[in-house]
Amino acid sequence: LMTGEKDSVLATAMRNGKRAVSAEEWVLLATSNSDAIAKQAALSVPDVFLPRLLLCCGMPKTSLFTMLERLSKLGASVSDPSKLYNELISTSAVSEWGLQKGTLITIKKRLHGRIASYLRIFSNEMVDYAQDECAFVTWLASEVSTSTSKKSASTSGFRNQIMNIINPFASSSFDEGSFVDLEEEEMDLSTDERMVIDDGESKGPEMCPTNGMLTEEFVISSPTELLHESLEQFKNDAILRKKEFDASALVRTLMNSYESSNCDHSLGRLILKFVPQLSQFCCDDNLWQTTFISAAGKSIDEQYLLSLVSGCVVHWSDEAIAACQKWILTQDELKNALSMKLMFRFLVASSKQDSIHYFQSNYKCESNFVCVRSERNAESTMKMVCKYLELTTDKSSGTSSENGSDIPDWLLLTCIVAKSHQQCIVAMILRTIDSKSSCAPAMHSILLRLYLMFPT
């Protein structure tokens, strides 16, 4: 938007109760690889979004200085700059930013740290700009400093009150070394750990049932150390090819046990360590069905399942990963949003794509990534994304139910595929918009992002 057009467009939009350009879209424009687009966004963005844009990573120098200059002029135009700046970072203003909730002082600290980092990065290029000339930066530094001083004094006083209650004769200071760091006592379950197992007669309970497979009863009732030894023995046998076992059945047993134990922390850590390692020896349709579909139907934390899928990418062979990628593209009848989210995480993590933010304009994603190997595969990937958005989009508001400021995996996957099949993906997006689908609003945001990634 040109500066002259901004007021009329925004006024019309606000009469309808909605902004013409959302905070997320202003972020995309302000962080564009094109300096012209970024600077124009910094000139055109509504005042209420200026602090939000300064929280962005990858801000061009011209865009940064333009916004700081606008904030300085805003402060100079009123009799009480502090009141104006507080209004820009008030609860009502922050609610429009689309970020996760946080206290205002936390936001001010993040903002101050981000601006300070930018000023250090551009210190050699700040010939015509001085930090002390920016009233907003000076005010922000003062707010953060005042808050830190108050918190330090409050914390010290509260600590002294507690110590006096516990021991009236205690000194106001205490030996911090007398407190035990509980984290140091946690069991180390890193992938490099190797426990020595006695090949002689077992002195404890039977390690496994007679059929050689763990049962849910055994998993839940066994001490953590014994279960760890059992799983380690399974892994050693698989490495030495001593015993064939059904990896999908083992994963199913462990996940059922984890759910039955109300997501016991110790058992959960063992599963995160051993399931990716053990499943690499038997990757097939049954295993993938258990990992991506059956597990998604259980009462297990979403982030835990995403971590499990990421661990599988680390341990599975390239052949197993490629086979699983092909299998995922055939699952066009899925109706479980979490299953699809797990699949998106697997595809993104196994794409061998380092970042979507920095690449050459003629760069193509590696052809061994199944999703970009052909136009047909790219279309199948985009169809899965559209179906996921239809499942997660609120029909009344037209917005996705996903929260958080991180770029979701479905959007990362779309950008990765679009690098190699721009025309195909853009055509599908336009058809989706024309179809008036419930996910059409999300398509507008994707289209803007792709335009900023591929402006030519």
Image (cartoon, rainbow, N blue to C red):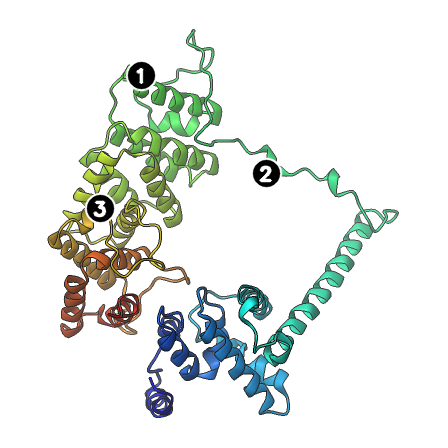
Earlier in the chain: of badge 1 and badge 2, it is 2
Mark 1 vs mark 2: in front: 1
Query: Residue most toward the left?
Result: 376
- Residue occupying the point 42% across, 81% down: 45
> Dot 2 surroundings within 10 Å: few (below 14), some, or many (20 or more)?
few
**Residue picked out by circle 1:** 240
Instruction: Residue at 55% x, 34% y: name it.
Output: 186
Q: How busy is the neighbourhood of tag 1: few (under 14 within 10 Å), some, or many (20 plus)?
A: few
Quarter of the image for residue 75 reads: bottom right
Badge 1 amino acid: Leu
Provide the secondary structure element on which disc 2 rests: helix
Helix, strand or loop under label 1: loop
User: Where residue 109 sits in the image (x, y, percent)?
Assistant: 59, 66
**Visible in this render: residue 449?**
yes
Of discs 3 and 1, which sits in the foreground? 3
Q: Position of residue 311 (x, y in %)?
A: 36, 39
The image shows residue 20 at horizontal and vertical percentages of 33, 82
Q: Nearer the viewer, residue 60 or 199?
A: 60
Q: Nearer the viewer, residue 51 or 373?
A: 373
Circle nearer the N terminus (3, 2)? 2
| Residue 367 drawn above or below residue 317 | below
Q: Residue furthest top?
A: 200
Residue at image mark 3: 369
Report the amino acid beneath label 3.
Phe
State the CA–CA distance, disc 3 to disc 2: 39 Å
What residue do we see at 60% from left, 89% from top? Answer: 76
Q: What label does residue 183 carry, if any? A: 2
Q: Is residue 92 visible?
A: no
Q: Residue at x 17, y 42 (%)?
A: 327
Q: Amino acid at mark 2?
A: Glu
380 versus 74 height, above or below = above
Tell me which label, 3 or 1, sits earlier in the chain: 1
